[in-house]
Image: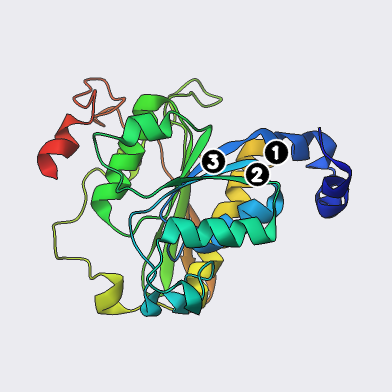
Amino acid sequence: MLQSDELERYARHIVLHEIGGPGQNALKQARVLVVGAGGLGAPLLLYLAAAGVGTLGIVDDDTVSLSNLQRQVIHGTPDVGRAKVESAAAAIAALNPHVAVERHPVRLGPDNALDLIGRYDLVTDGSDNFATRYLVSDACCLAGKPLVTAALGVFDGTLTTLRPFERGPDGTLNPTYRCLFPEPPPPGTVPTCAEAGILGAFAGVLGTLMAVEVVREIVGFGEGLVGRLLMVDGRGPRFETLRYAWDPANPLTGEHPTITDLSGHRRAA
C-alpha cells in the first residue's frame, strides 16, 4: 500500500488513467536490475527512482571519473573516485527515500549473471560493450526475464524490449537479441566512447526513453517495443521504428538451439 506522502509524491502518476493507484502499486512492488550506472544507466536510474520503482539493483564495478560527468548525471564532482554503485545509491536516496537500492559492485560475467538476474523481475542493459550486451540478453532469455536494452553511438541510439520466452499474438515466439543482431561486430570495428566521443545530452534522451519503456512494461499500457527496434538519430532529430521477428535459425530459441547455458561467454571472456 502507498503511504500518505507517496500519494502526494506520485500524484501526477496516480491521476493518469494508464497508471492510477494500481499501476503505482505495481511500480512499488517491482524489482528492476540496471546493468551499468553510466551514460544510459544514470538518467534511467534517476527516473525509475522518481517513478517509485520499489527496488533498484545496480551492477557496476567502475568508479566515477571526471570525464564521466559530461553525461552521467547521477554522479557529481565530489563523487570522483567513488564507486559508481555508491554514488548512484546516494543520489537515489536523496531523490526518493522509498526506493531500496541493492548494490552489486561487480562486473557482470557468465559466472554471476544468472544468479543476479534471477533476483529481479525485469532487467535493463545500458552497458557500453558488445560482450556484456550479448551476455545479458542470452542470460535474460535463459532465465525467462524481460530485458529493456539500449545502445548508444555518437549521435544515434537504439532501444528494444526482449521477451523471447513468450509468444506473440500470432503464436510465434518473440524474437531474441540474436534474431536482430546474430553476431557482434568484429573487435575494433566500432570505436569506443572515449575514441569517438558522445553528445552528453543525447545519452539522457535514450536513458529516459528506457525509463519510459520500463514503466510501461511494469504497469502494462500501450504498445511496447517487443519485436520493434526504436532508432533515434540525434542529428535530425529523427525517430524511426524497425520491426523484426523470430529467426528459426537463432541459436537460443531457434529450431536447433546451440546455446543452452553461458559457457560460450566464459570461453570468449
Q: Are marks 3 and 1 in contact (CB under 8 Å)?
A: no
- Which residue is most to the left? 267
SS assignment at label 3: strand
Q: Where is residue 216 drawn, in percent x and y? A: 65, 43
Relative to 141, is 192 above or below? below
SS assignment at label 2: loop
Q: Are marks 2 and 3 in contact (CB under 8 Å)?
A: yes
Relative to 54, is 68 above or below? below
**Location of residue 17 by image quarter:** top right
> What type is the residue that disc 2 sits on?
Val
The residue closer to the viewer here, 184 or 194, is: 194
> What type is the residue that disc 1 sits on?
Lys
Q: Where is residue 76 drawn, in percent x and y? A: 51, 74
> What type is the residue that disc 3 sits on?
Val
Residue at left 49%, top 20%?
A: 171
Way the structure is coloured: rainbow
Residues under labels 2 and 1: Cα distance?
5 Å
Determine whether, in the image, residue 118 is placed left or right of residue 219: left
Residue named by callout 2: 53
The residue closer to the viewer here, 64 or 211, is: 64
Residue at left 14%, top 45%?
A: 269
Residue named by callout 3: 32
Does label 2 or label 3 sit earlier along the sequence?
3
Neighbour class for label 3 at 10 Å: few (<14), some, many (≥20)? many
Residue at left 34%, top 44%?
A: 180
Determine whether, in the image, residue 232 is placed left or right of residue 139: right
Residue named by callout 1: 28
Residues under labels 3 and 1: Cα distance?
11 Å
